[in-house]
Image (spheres, helix red, strand yellow):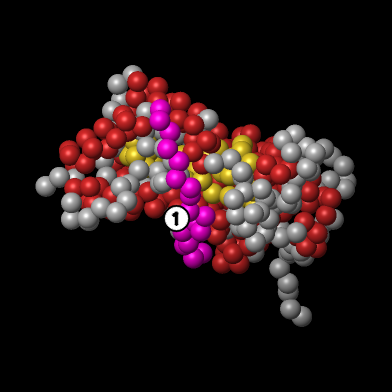
Amino acid sequence: MRTLRDTSNPFNTPEEVFRKMFRFPRNLAHEYFLQMHQFLEDGQRSTRIPAVTQFFIALHFYAHGSYQKSIGKDRDHSVCQSSVSRCLHRVTNTIVNHLAPRFIKFPQTIDEITDVKNGFFDKFGFPGVVGAIDGTHIAIVCPPLGGRPPGNVYLNRKNFYSINAQIICDSALKILSLNCRYPGSVHDAAIWQMSAIFRHLRNNYRNGDRTSWLLGDAGYPLQPFLLLPIAGVNPETPQGRYSQAHIRARNTVERCIGVVKGTFRCLLKDRTLHYKPAFAAKLIIACATLHNILKRANVENELEDHDDPDNDHDNVDFADLYQEGINTRNLVIRNYFTD
């Protein structure tokens, strides 16, 4: 008779199948399961769901974005929909509370900042870059219209309900900062102006740091620490060389968003998160944390690498710091992109 594998333990799954199911190599998944194990224990009841089952139910959901009922009926899990929901909440809260602060950190020390700057300069020839910034919409179901905030504020310019997540990444596609507190109707520039990273870079600039910049697109205001490309310039001029280098370097954040959504498909627009905005934001943070864990372990993504399709923006200018941004951009062009 054929001997079938023990489906009660996903760690017994062949490596290739395991990677497709959960996006992690078995040894890496085991390492982080051990770190989370103590937070997933659920007493001594005979009917309790083992921590390992909770862990893999959540990974399965992140990777595929399936409905909870279909995940529960999977022969590797075999639990009801309500149990899947409890497992997903418990694992997501554990990742957000205990792993995310370790793995999503904007560079603070001189060594960390230098490493990020060197990465952008080595790959794209653009000096002083501490990150590339962009926003992406994560689709959610319509929240209650009478809620606080009302559900209609989550309706974005593309006519679907979403959370507008602001992402900053480095040249290796590692996420340095994630802000997913705002509804889809809030403009990228407004999220930036209300963010802690904006205040951090503005304070550093006022304290004398003139050589640390983020790279943004036309959806953001030009500022002395947030540089934009120049549209319609001759590529053979210093302004053109600056813009070409800027576009290549900033494209990392679009690639990063595409990789995250391609790996953890619960974030794709076609899947749509059927949760309240607060928990949907936690799911986004959890997926970003797992993405950074994979990056730190140098796990190559075998899925197709797409740019983020949500990369068109309304152009917005802010008078505050704008002229200083013009001066900084001209200085960068003169120092680094003039023959």
* Quadrant in the picture for the N terminus: bottom right
Q: Residues within 10 Å of mark 1 (few under 14, many from 20)?
A: some
Residue that appears at 35% across and 20% down: 206
Image spot of residue 257 (x, y percent): 50, 52
Q: Describe residue 196's horizontal placement relative to residue 66 as left or right.
A: left
Residue 73, quarter of the rendered image: bottom right
Percent coordinates x, y for residue 105 in the rendering: 48, 35
159 to 151, vertically: above or below: below
Q: Residue 183: x and y, percent?
A: 63, 41
Q: From this viewpoint, which residue is outermost toward the bottom?
A: 1
Q: Is residue 218 visible?
A: yes
Any magenta on residue 307? yes
> Of 294 and 319, which appears nearest the observer?
319
Q: Give amino acid for label 1.
A: Arg
Q: Is residue 62 visible?
A: no
The residue located at (87%, 42%) in the rendering is: 45
Q: Which residue is mark 1?
A: 255
Q: Give coordinates of residue 176: x percent, y percent.
A: 46, 39
Tell me where the magenta segment starts and ends, as one range.
301-320
Q: Residue at x 26, y 32 (%)?
A: 327
Q: Report the number of numbered marks.
A: 1
- Residue extending farthest to the right is 46
Residue 305: say if magenta: yes
Q: Residue at x 48, y 62 (%)?
A: 306
Query: Residue most toward the top?
Result: 207
Q: Say whether residue 104 is left or right of residue 332.
A: right
Of residues 219 and 261, the one nearer the viewer is 219
Q: Secondary structure at mark 1?
A: helix
Predominant SS of the magenta segment: loop
